[in-house]
Amino acid sequence: MMANEEKPTGKIGASVFALGIVSFLTDVSSEMIFPILPVFITTFLGASTVILGLIEGTADSIASIVEIFSGYWADRTGNRKQLVELGYGLSSFMKIFIAIANSWPFIFVARALERVGKGIRTSPRDAIIASDSPPDQRGKAFGIHRAMDTAGAVVGPTLALIIFILIGQSESAYRTVFFLAIIPAFLSVAVLYLFVREPKPETAVAPKTRTPFWQALREMPPEYMVYLKVSILFSLSYFSFAFFIVRASDLKIAEDSIIILYLIYNIAYALASIPAGMLSDKIGRKGVIAGSFVLYALVCLGFTLAGSYLQLAGLFIIYGVFVAIDDSVNKAYITDIAKEEKRGIALGAYNTAVGVAYLPASIVAGAIWAAFGAPAAFISAAFIALLGAIGMALFCR
């Protein structure tokens, strides 16, 4: 099969499942490190919260910016798997430097390059998933990948928590977690190299006939551009997950109970990913995505009213269902619209655009929270999310 052909109706390809295992192992590694890294940076390396914000903000921004160029290069060269290997390999290698870091500038560089790896791998990886799944099962394929990925986000923090219970929360305990996290990171690279296969075109495209970057963006179909605008609008409501954690803390929820809420969220996310994708295969993606925007608005409104741990647990479950839809059905929708030879840049442009929108969303939400209180921030987000749902229903195909 040529790389620019659709996979015929049939079974989801083996590479989808192999990439799911790769993402599971990577998330086990990442979720062992990154939920506890802020405490390590501020407590043991002596960095301020301003420095912490600089490190995390830079890391997330770099990942978003890189994705569009990685997607374009994957389309241009046809070597998607090589970029995926480079991305996962770079991220895994940088975790070694995080484990041995003895100052925050060292962490800053390692964290930024680790996120560069994420930016490099995401768009070409998702393009491979789309190419290795039949159109009528593409939602299910992305759902399978997200479920396996998120299962790692359950296992990773659990392992870190067990290690802390066994040996305490000293600096050596943190470094033990960081070093142990390197093992699943490099196992993921081995699985990727050995078991993921990408169909290659029979003939290479001559460099001078390849579409230039800006022309490739301009040639995206009108349906894609409409959806991108709607997604950016909705993303202005989609502030950082940390706000939900802070809200739980404001309601006097203990730290260990907040960790349990985080695990509940990830379990719901993992369990809902495959059913969400399959539902979009059956009834269409537009309605599922619009419904998810409404679901997010309801979650935001719920956080203005919640007052008990049980209510918060329910809201985190619903939020997990929303994110499952957001991370799987949206990608399936994009790969339905975009041509095979331009899926890399289509996915990359989407990831970059919404990633850039997340920054002002979080800044504005934080400012509203500081000036008028948490309910105002959540209500504002709910209003924008509902506008996004209306835009999805009225203007998208």
Image: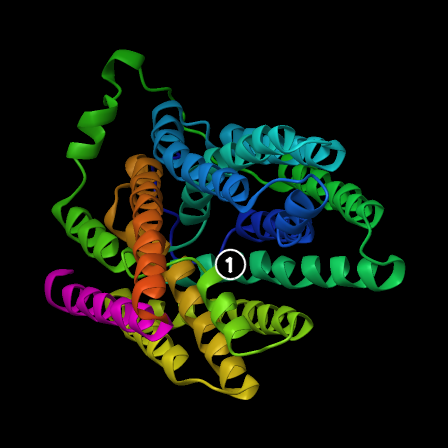
| Front one among 1 and 69 | 69
Q: Is residue 79 visible?
A: yes
By secondary structure, the bulk of the magenta-drawn segment is best described as: helix
Relative image position of residue 89 (x, y in whole percent): 62, 31
| Front one among 367 and 1 | 367
Question: Which residue appears farthest toward the front when viewing the image?
Answer: 371
Which residues, given as a range, are shown in magenta? 374-397
Helix, strand or loop under label 1:
helix
Relative image position of residue 214 (x, y in whole percent): 20, 26
| Residue carrying label 1 | 146
Residue at (19%, 56%) from the top-left corner?
Answer: 230
The reply, left or right, for residue 260 in relation to residue 380 is right
Question: Which residue appears farthest toward the top when viewing the image?
Answer: 208
The reply, left or right, for residue 349 in relation to residue 123 is left
Relative image position of residue 372 (x, y in whole percent): 30, 69
- Up the image or down, 188 lies above or below 382; here it is above
Residue at (33%, 79%) from the top-left corner?
Answer: 301
| Front one among 395 and 387 | 387
Is the image coloured rainbow, by chain, by secondary structure, or in one colour? rainbow
Residue at (82%, 50%) from the top-left corner?
Answer: 173
Please state which amino acid type lies under the numbered disc 1: Arg
Is residue 394 found inside the magenta-colored segment of the image?
Answer: yes
Q: Is residue 275 visible?
A: no
Q: Quadrant of the C terminus?
A: bottom left
Q: Quadrant of residue 178?
A: top right
Relative image position of residue 340 (x, y in whole percent): 31, 40
The reply, left or right, for residue 388 in relation to residue 68 is left
Q: Counting other residues with Cα less than 10 Å from the Cα at mark 1, is it few (<14), some (14-19), or many (20 or more)?
A: many
Is residue 130 found inside the magenta-colored segment of the image?
Answer: no
Q: Quadrant of the N terminus?
A: top left
Q: Quadrant of residue 139?
A: bottom left
